[in-house]
Image (tube, grey):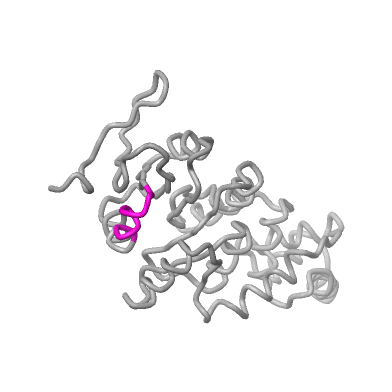
Amino acid sequence: MSALHRAIVTTTGNLTTNCIRRGYQGLGAKIVLVASDNLNVQNWLYQYLEPYGKKGFAFVFVETEYDFIDYARKHDTVTAFIEDMFFEARILGKLENIKKDYPRLRLIVFSSVRLSNEDAARYVCWSGGSYLSLRNGEDEINKSVLSIFDRQQIYPSYLVNDIVEYQQVHNREPYLTQKELEVVRLFSEGKNGKEIAVMLNVCERTLWTHTQNIYRKFGIHKMTKVIKYAVSKGLLSAKTIMNDKRNSNEN
């Protein structure tokens, strides 16, 4: 195994973290984080990053959020490739916080699975960075990585319309009444219209009116998108929604 691929143990202060570093080992190396707890995914991505290890970049592979934050604070850390599921449930809204806390850090969200266009577009907008799918063709991935290291924002052409749509919605600041917010919350729990009308003690016509008002305020006409948007704005708790989905699956 060459020195380029050699795994080393990195010590930070009094803390020893099992971070694998590959690439340029000299002083002044620009640190690029790869955040994934899956070794196969790490190796899969690294085959596209390896050529840049000879151009002054050192790649640090982190498997925990603690290690990620520890390296993100360093001034020589310039870029972070983050697997879409790295922060687990907390990915909802987490990328926006990272972008605000570390504005100098370029963020690239990547996925080794097939994400919906809506999810991928949301990650692009939240991170303010690029998106890379390892399910794309090899030539396309190589071109995307080249563009990223040329400091361009890059994402697949099939996401453009979804990104534009999400940006339009995301920039809105709708005010929901308490009743409207309750309607969205109940829909997020998987309740249907009849069930919600009974729970709110209103007729279905009144519920329809509430729903149309919600759509008008959000500028979109699909409840699944309304729910995702409400989460992104902090109007609904992502944790609550995920617990509700988990409970419904168990039942």
User: Is residue 239 shown to the viewer in this render?
Assistant: no
Q: In this view, does 215 lie to the left or right of 192?
A: right
Report the magenta residues as a range: 49-57
Residue 50 is at least partly visible in this image: yes
Residue lying farthest to the top in this orientation: 14
Which residue shows up at 38% across the image and 66% down it? 113
Residue 51 % position (x, y): 30, 60
Most prominent secondary structure in the magenta stretch?
A: helix
Q: Residue 183, position in %: x, y?
A: 75, 62
For residue 14, which quarter of the picture? Answer: top left
Looking at the image, residue 48 sits to the left or right of residue 200; the answer is left
Query: How far across and down, in percent of the image, does residue 42 sit?
Result: 31, 53
Could you say which is closer to the camera, residue 90 or residue 58? 58
User: In the displayed structure, does residue 56 sit left or right of residue 159?
Assistant: left
Q: Is residue 78 above or below residue 166?
A: above
Q: Residue at image x 50%, y 72%?
A: 116
* Residue depicted at 67% across the width and 70% down the height: 166
In the picture shown, does residue 226 fall above or below 35?
A: below
Residue 177, compared with residue 118, is above or below; it is above
**Residue drawn at 79 percent across, 74 percent down:** 219
The answer to whether residue 210 is left or right of residue 238 is right
- Whether residue 67 appears in magenta in the rendering, the answer is no
Question: Whole-percent x and y of residue 251?
Answer: 46, 56
Q: Residue furthest left?
A: 1
